[in-house]
Amino acid sequence: MGWAAPWGPWASPLVRSGNSSASSRSPGVMLTRDRYPVQRLPFSVVSEDDLAALERIVPGRVITDPEELEAPNVDWLRTVRGSSQVLLRPRTTQEVAHVLRYCHERNLAVSPQGGNTGMVGGSTPVFDEIILSTALMNQVISFQDMSGVLVCQAGCVLEELSQYVEERGFVMPLDLGAKGSCHIGGNVATNAGGLRFLRYGSLRGTVLGLEAVLADGTVLNCLTSLRKDNTGYDLKQLFIGSEGTLGVITAVSILCPPRPSAVSVAFLGCPGFAEVLQTFSTCRQLLGEILSAFEFMDAECMQLVGRHLRLASPVQESPFYVLIETSGSEAGHDAEKLSSFLEQVQGSGLVTDGTLATDQRRIQALWALRERISEALSRDGYVYKYDLSLPLDRLYDLVGDLRTRLGPSAKHVVGYGHLGDGNLHLNVTAEAFCESLLGALEPYVYEWTARQQGSVSAEHGLGFKKRDVAGYSKAPEALRLMRQLKALLDPRGILNPYKTLPAHA
Amino acid sequence: MGWAAPWGPWASPLVRSGNSSASSRSPGVMLTRDRYPVQRLPFSVVSEDDLAALERIVPGRVITDPEELEAPNVDWLRTVRGSSQVLLRPRTTQEVAHVLRYCHERNLAVSPQGGNTGMVGGSTPVFDEIILSTALMNQVISFQDMSGVLVCQAGCVLEELSQYVEERGFVMPLDLGAKGSCHIGGNVATNAGGLRFLRYGSLRGTVLGLEAVLADGTVLNCLTSLRKDNTGYDLKQLFIGSEGTLGVITAVSILCPPRPSAVSVAFLGCPGFAEVLQTFSTCRQLLGEILSAFEFMDAECMQLVGRHLRLASPVQESPFYVLIETSGSEAGHDAEKLSSFLEQVQGSGLVTDGTLATDQRRIQALWALRERISEALSRDGYVYKYDLSLPLDRLYDLVGDLRTRLGPSAKHVVGYGHLGDGNLHLNVTAEAFCESLLGALEPYVYEWTARQQGSVSAEHGLGFKKRDVAGYSKAPEALRLMRQLKALLDPRGILNPYKTLPAHA
């Protein structure tokens, strides 16, 4: 077992998952209205007069070309397809406000869209909603060098923001596989979790302020840059995680932590899930404040990543793999902590093989194994995706349970995810979409999760595809209050209809 | 300059500020309705029939003895006094629900009260509201050893919870001077900041779930213990920081970080505020992830703490003092980081004297200097208190500005606070309350703060005393939405009336 063993045979490990081109890969995604039982609500239909009026609000940025509308009508997972015939590209908050005021008056439905990288069909239209794209709202508004507070428009791409703040000695408090395409406004609207959650916590803490446009065109300016502000209700929280159903986020103020001067990644093989959990406990104890990620994946994930992406495992074959990242201010100290941690987990048999990386290229290569699982799965066939929060000690039980339950009707049943946050990504692949397999999975997975007091959507949100399962994790009184809030903020229901709120009251 | 210099002459430094007995110290606090221009709203008056009905809901726990009602009618700062004639002590959520359902039907106003340690008159009745005390709701419901998630009733005292989780290897993510009296439910309702905010962030991130009873008696159970849950709107955020105006928090689920194995405190003297800021920058860079608090106080604070509490400064007299706490998992590493930090700030003249403590007793003694400022001020006379968020580089300007502006009409103008969070506590003392001094302070302080895009209440909330200044930090559209939310959740306005929402629309 060599911690500094020669590097294994890697195939293009630096390539990030290319969400942006996914939707143009091939035709043939069924229309949402055909696959799912959903009825169009009585919104107006966009008329020639409407197009002329919208053209006056965002001149030259009203898109009606069917070819240009192909990609934004389909989600990147290729599971839902809308039939929108209009996409708008505002540049300013005022333009968004004018658009919404107009749509509100005309009772036209609107589907806000950032990078369109969501997992639950939250960012694509269901019928003919007008797509309101944040793509041209991509300006940094300000950055404070002393405090690390970034203020920017909603359409800034996460990776570009990361580069921007890293050049200034800070990091974005969130990071995710889709960083190359996703927009910060979409991240906030989804309350994205991602890979740095364990260290820097939720966007509910790191987003200091935001600006949103309400359904009737009112601009709500809560774009403060203060770490603390207890002057009444924290209205911005309404918009974080509400998936564009209560307002359109147009700008964000976010607290960036100082960039750690030393980052290391250990990639380890564990003989069983109990050992994964014990490795996590040991890790929290010995790595303490420098721990910045604790991810896991099972053996089938590694096989799929190898088969479809030709990425080779850097360690011996194991039932489970763990990726541990540390970030600290003093490389020598971090190395010592890591070394005593690795000695302990190796000595006690919790870990059977492992490798350690401290240079950027190898760190990225190790991360690619974990970050590209989703891409490997989508190449394996049709993917049934579940994003669950579960108690740590039961986190993996459902995976084995499902393998038995589904038998050969599933191609693969895999489990991976943000173990440090209690977040399991459970994925099942099949050659093609199959109603009977779906029936074996649902509501079984949701009922299983509800029995553990888990969450049926840990970080992906509800969007279109999960909105009817909210009740497995939310009490009826909570769902009622959600509907009341929707009615208060968007009385005509024009903002991202058919999303987030359960269809059946 | 000796970092391990002999300890100075300390006078009982371990005594925490005793909020709990403050309100019985002396009589003579003016009734709120006499001092402030406020009109009673047309709620019902508690009748004999009401008392009998309430007695059936919380048998033996309906308090009407005027002597017992004296303390809960007055805030601990002795600035407001209500005239409530009834206090209820429910033990369970169901009892709270029954009480509120009854009060809602009868149109009786209710003032929820925890430890009554608030700074803005948010927890005392203004007129004859029924006081709903959480004092008997003080049970821990569960604690998860692996994840550190504590679930408890709202009336648990913060210090007792701290002891409870520390015995199990964790710490509470918040700490404040009033810890010996304040209730966790009140902390959450106020969105308390405190001394560990810099390290563990806002309650908006660390509170995982809560249970609240709405105005009509509906129990809203959002008491999840999951780190991530994106199943729709995050309703608990409505209640965090809404000061009991939208619902009564009855139970809380909170994420406790692992207890650091090494804690150190450095107490330093700085020659000017520019040096304080540079010390902070250096600190963030060299102490990085182990920094857990960065507090400052000015020379007048130290004089008042010396005069009124007989606490002596452990370092040479300086214009400013800084308290830096580190918390880490490896004492040797932390000591090395601290040592190179202290060398640098000493060598570059940012710091002119200092002392370092690593044992519990001396750490507490150093913290007492900072934590007991508020107590020293209250012994100095009538205190005008301002709790502001400001840009770091302008944080102290207002203090000097006010000294010039007020001249001898003020006894003392002092500045201290959570510099690491951009939070200034600005306090002005006078022999007694004086209308003309108030006129010189307000709206001047608020206007000054608004010009810097600061917050006129960083962590104390609005309560009764600050509700009319919310507009200095919140846009009219935001205030309107606040009122709409209040009307949605508490249509009769019975919950903590005269609080949080500005009186003048």
Image: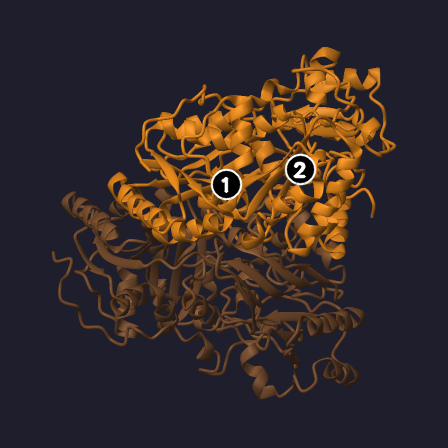
Chain colours: A brown, B orange
At which x and y percent is residue B128?
80, 24
The one of B411 and B498 positioned closer to us in this rendering: B411
- Left or right: A70, with A441 as reference point: right
Q: Secondary structure at mark 2?
A: loop
Residue A374 sits in which quadrant? bottom left
The one of B90 and A258 positioned closer to us in this rendering: A258
The one of A259 and B343 positioned closer to us in this rendering: B343
What amino acid type should be assigned to the residue bearing mark 1?
Pro
At which x and y percent is residue B191?
59, 40
Residue B448 appearing in the image:
yes
At which x and y percent is residue B393?
54, 54
Residue at image position (62%, 62%) is: A499
Which residue has dot 2 on it?
Answer: B243
At which x and y percent is residue B45?
85, 23
Q: Secondary structure at mark 1?
A: loop
Look at the picture and state if B55 lies above or below A188: above
Which residue has dot 1 on it?
Answer: B319
Mark 2 neighbour class, 10 Å CA radius: few under 14, some 14 to 19, many 20 or more: many
Q: Quick one: quadrant of the N terminus of chain B? A: top left
- Left or right: A314, with A28 as reference point: left
